[in-house]
Amino acid sequence: MKWTVRKFRAAKGGEPMGLVTAYDYITARMAARAGVPLVLVGDSLATTALGFSTTLPATMDAMVHHAEAVRRGAPDALVVGDMPFLSYATVPDALKNAGRFMREAGCDAVKLEGGVPRAEAIRALVQEGIPVQAHIGLQPQSVKSTGYAVRGKTPEDIAALERDIDAVAAAGAFSVVLECVMPDVAAALTKRVDIPTIGVGSGSACDAQYLVLADLLGLGDGPAPKFAKQYASLADTAAEAIARYRADVAQRAFPDAGHTY
């Protein structure tokens, strides 16, 4: 059954949902087979799939290209395109680039980072029929100015998060990511709004959780982030399989008669 924005929003307060970030047809098919309701085509594409050290080099062309593949791989999931760095610096930019995700890639919604400063863009997108997932707390596209730190440790920080979540909810966002927020604060924010919250390292009280599929499956080179739990070690399995293949070729055991025309 196809997941829609309306269905996802109505799931708030129910059984917590496990969501993933994927970048291509193969990984999207894995998510689809597992029944994942929402797949984010994240700008973490830049670090996880393209080898960059930050998410900033992700371009609209690259994001749309990969979102198209994910759409084909997960036809029943709610597919969200992550707006890359500077693609929504102005409202006209946001409308143009979000439109590309919807028209060219077949996405169901877009995600953008920021609270109060992005309310105008969220409202403009929603008014044009483009569903928006907001993202507050730690915002990876801004870490060069804000740094990596847990949000919600001080009264001032909590008040800022409350203003942000109120602003994005009022602007019409259908859900909101809470990244690297103190768990008790994330729990309070989840109760504060009538839209689903999606946690990234923010505790179990959120309505849903995000994990990058490469972290979940153990496909990366280095250690996964603190908030990511590794459920498999597929990179090791794949490397061992490739090594066995190379050994078979070296010994002329492959191809054998059963694998030759």
Image (tube, grey):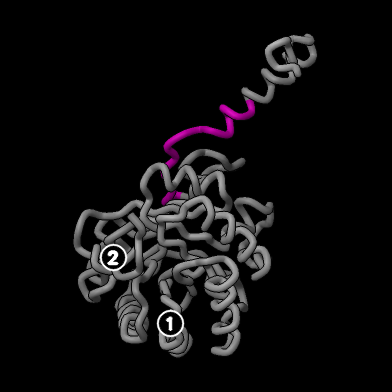
Q: Label 1 sits on what residue type?
A: Gly
Mark 1 Cα shell of 10 Å, populated few (<14), some (14-19), many (≥20): few
Mark 2 Cα shell of 10 Å, populated few (<14), some (14-19), many (≥20): few
Residues marked 2 and 1 touching at CB (< 8 Å): no
Q: In this picture, which residue range is highlighted in magenta?
A: 226-239
User: Which percent across, then down, holds residue 102?
Assistant: 53, 72
Label 2 secondary element = helix
The answer, for residue 78, to whether it is visible in the render is yes
C-alpha span from label 2 to label 1? 16 Å
- The part of the image, by quadrant, that contains residue 199 is bottom left
On screen, residue 244 versus residue 155, left or right, reads right
- The part of the image, by quadrant, that contains residue 186 is bottom left
At horizontal 66% and vertical 63% (from top left) the residue drawn is 62
Label 1 secondary element = loop
Q: Please state, as top left, top right, bottom left or bottom right, where the N terminus lies in the image.
A: bottom left
**Is-magenta flag for residue 229?**
yes
Q: Label 2 sits on what residue type?
A: Lys
On screen, residue 59 versus residue 196, left or right, reads right
Q: Is residue 56 above or below residue 39?
A: below
On screen, residue 60 versus residue 150, left or right, reads right
At horizontal 44% and vertical 53% (from top left) the residue drawn is 20
> Which one is earlier in the sequence, the residue at label 2 or at label 1?
2
User: Which percent across, then down, holds residue 238?
Assistant: 60, 29
Residue receiving disc 1: 129
User: Which percent across, then down, holds residue 39?
Assistant: 45, 57
On screen, residue 149 versus residue 221, left or right, reads left
At horizontal 68% and vertical 12% (from top left) the residue drawn is 258
Residue receiving disc 2: 7
